[in-house]
Image (cartoon, rainbow, N blue to C red):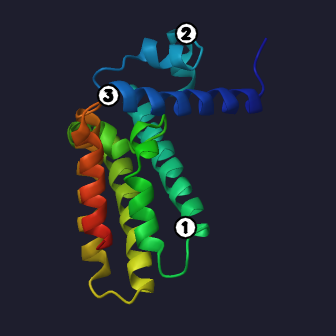
Amino acid sequence: MRKSREETATTRRRIIESSARELRRLGIDGSGLTGLMAAAGLSQGGFYKHFTSKAQLVAESVEVGVEGLIGGLQRLLADSDKGRGFATLVSGYLSQAHRDGDAGCPYAGLGSELARADEPVRGAAIEGFERMVGLLAEQLDEQGDKGAREQALFAMCAMMGAVTVSRMAEGRTLADEVLDVVGSRLRGD
């Protein structure tokens, strides 16, 4: 029996969302099609009904990861005090929940692998990175900061690095210390 278009779209979305989590956890090279499909509760046989290549799935998974990241940060912004948007974004990104969560930043989880990935994957990653920088820069613009884009670029790179090192140092005092120090410096505490 054939699946309806809605069922096919739902299945495809499930594959992408579960792959985003698996890729963050295992990396691009550490994730095979069998494991990615199994994470979605499917067999590898159906993969090519939804995607032309693993690169396409990775690119779409990065897009979904960035959407989740930006959506979560925008929800934090909605609850933040006027003029505190940048500090709210920094604190949210550098939180233990973000570091340890299932849907954390794709950049911190896949960093160097994204740099070596196929063009569609790199393109999706760069587009999302630009959106994150834009979100940070908007908050700095609202505060009247000059050079908002430059500061936002610096902040995003510092935050990605901090989360990456914090994940490497899992279980050690250094893991939380890195988040605290980088956050404090970026917020100007």
Estimate the spatial distance between the alpha carbons at disc 3 and disc 2, rounded to whole Å: 19 Å
Say if residue 119 shows up in the picture.
no
- Provide the secondary structure element on which disc 1 rests: helix
**Going by the image, does 98 lie left or right of 68?**
left
Amino acid identity at mark 1: Leu
Crowd around label 3: few <14 · some 14–19 · many ≥20 (10 Å): many
Foreground mark, 1 or 2, reads 1
Q: Which residue is mark 3?
A: 28
Hey, which quadrant is residue 87 in on the image?
Answer: bottom left
Q: Which residue is mark 1?
A: 77
Q: What residue lies at 61% left-to-right and 67% top-to-bottom?
A: 79
Hey, which quadrant is residue 32 in on the image?
Answer: top left
Q: Position of residue 182 (x, y in %)?
A: 25, 58
Estimate the spatial distance between the alpha carbons at disc 1 and disc 2, rounded to whole Å: 40 Å
Q: Position of residue 107 (x, y in %)?
A: 32, 45
Foreground mark, 3 or 1, reads 1
Amino acid identity at mark 2: Ser
Foreground mark, 3 or 2, reads 3
Q: What residue lies at 26% left-to-right and 83% top-to-bottom?
A: 147
Say if residue 75 shows up in the picture.
yes
- Provide the secondary structure element on which disc 3 rests: loop
Q: Which residue is mark 2?
A: 43
